[in-house]
Image (cartoon, rainbow, N blue to C red):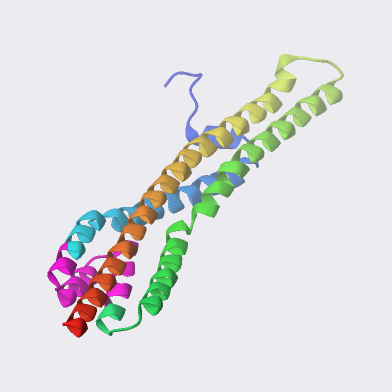
Amino acid sequence: MNDTSYELLTIFVDGGFMMYPLVLCSLAALGVILAKAWTLRIAHRDSQHLLEDIEALGTEGELQKAIDRAHETRGPVAAILLTGLKRLSENQQGKDIQKAIKTTGTLELDFLERGLVVLATIANVAPMLGFLGTVIGMIAAFDAIEAAGQVEPALVASGIKIALITTAAGLTIAIPVNIAYNYFVTRIDALIADMELGSQAVLEMIWRAQDSVSARRNG
C-alpha cells in the first residue's frame, strides 16, 4: 500500500465526528436492504406458478386442493388467495369475500412497503450530513487561517480533508441506497399486479360457482 492510500479506519478518523452518523446510516440501510431483499424474494417466489395452479384447480372445481396449494405457499399473493378461497368454501357472499380480500391485500401491501421509508430517509439525509461535514471542515479551515494570520496550504489541509471525506461518504451511502429503494419499489409494483391477478382469480371462481348454482336451480 503506497503512502497516498487510506485505510477505512484512517478515513473514518480524518472525516471527523460527522462520520459517526454517516456510518450509522450506512449500517441501518444495509440491514433494511438485506431484510427487504429476502422478504421480496420470498414474496415473488412461486407466485406465478401458484396463480396458474389455482386457476387450473378452480376450473376443475377442486376448491379444497386450491386452498391447500395456497396454504403451502408463502407471500402476499398466496395470502390473498387463501383468504378468498377459505371464505368461498364457507359459502360466504361475494361482497363479503371481496371485502376480506381487500383487507388482506391492504395488510400485505403495508408489510411489503415496511422499511422503504427508512431507505428513502437515509437516501435524503446522508448527502445532507455529508454537506454538513463539508461546512464544518471549511469552518475549521478558516479558523486555522484566522489563528495563524496567514494562508498556508498546511493550515487549511485538515479542514478541506474533512470537507471532502464527509461529502464523499454521504454520496457513497446515498447512491446505492437510492438504487436499492427504486429497485424495491419496482418489485413491489410487480407484486401488486400479481395480487390483483390473485384477487381476480378468486372472483372468477365465485362467479363460476354462482353460475353453477343458478344452472342447477333453473334445471
Q: Residue at x 32, y 62 (%)?
A: 200
Query: Looking at the magenta stretch, what is its main secondary structure?
Result: helix
Which residue is outermost to the front? Answer: 218
Q: Residue at x 47, y 63 (%)?
A: 110
In the image, the segment drawn in magenta is 56-85
Q: Is 146 left or right of 55, judged from the image as shown?
A: right
**In the image shown, does 36 or 154 lie closer to the viewer?**
36
Q: Nearer the viewer, residue 90 or 93?
A: 93
Q: Position of residue 183 (x, y in %)?
A: 42, 43
Relative to 156, 65 lies left or right: left
Q: Is residue 163 magenta?
A: no
Q: Position of residue 59 (x, y in %)?
A: 16, 66
Image quarter hosting the N terminus: top left
Q: Quadrant of the C terminus?
A: bottom left
| Above-or-below relation of 181 to 202 | above
Residue 69 position, x and y percent, is 18, 69
